[in-house]
Amino acid sequence: MAGHYDIRRDRTGWTVFDRWTGMTVILDWAEKSGMSHPEAKVLAAALNRRGSAGDRSILQ
């Protein structure tokens, strides 16, 4: 998967992370880790679509 966000395996599932910083994505004050593979892929794709559409807002 190319883009700003990607996924990687973690101890309990999959993590969505920022490829530029290496940091785990945090949404709604929760780290996006320990997710199922399909769930992580969908979230990373959605975040990459937002970025490619010009949305640079910071999500918390």
Image (spheres, helix red, strand yellow):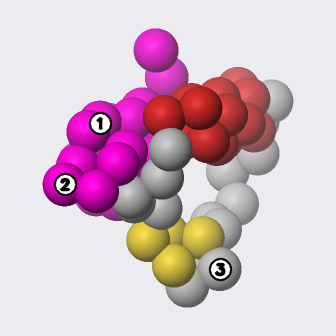
Q: CA distance from mark 1 to mark 2?
A: 10 Å
Residue at horizontal 29%, vertical 36%? 8
Name which residue lies at 42% across and 32% down. Answer: 6
> Mark 1 and 2 residues: CB-CB less than 8 Å, in contact?
no
Q: Earlier in the sequence, mark 1 or mark 3?
A: 1
Residue located beneath label 3 in the image: 28
Q: Quadrant of residue 20?
A: top left
The image position of residue 9, as x and y in percent, is: 26, 39
Image marks 1 and 3: residues in contact by CB distance under 8 Å: no
Above or below for 2 versus 37 = above
Mark 3: secondary structure: loop
Front one among 22 and 42: 42
Give the magenta part as a residue range.
1-24
Q: Which residue is mark 2?
A: 11
> In screen coordinates, is 41 left or right of 25?
right
Residue 18 at what x, y percent from top left?
A: 38, 46
Residue 32: where, in percent of width, then height? 47, 61
Near-viewer residue (31 or 23)? 31
Q: Earlier in the sequence, mark 3 or mark 2?
A: 2
Q: Is residue 55 visible?
A: yes
Q: Amino acid at mark 3?
A: Asp
Q: Is 56 drawn above or below residue 29 in the view shown?
A: above
Tell me the quarter of the image containing the C terminus: bottom right
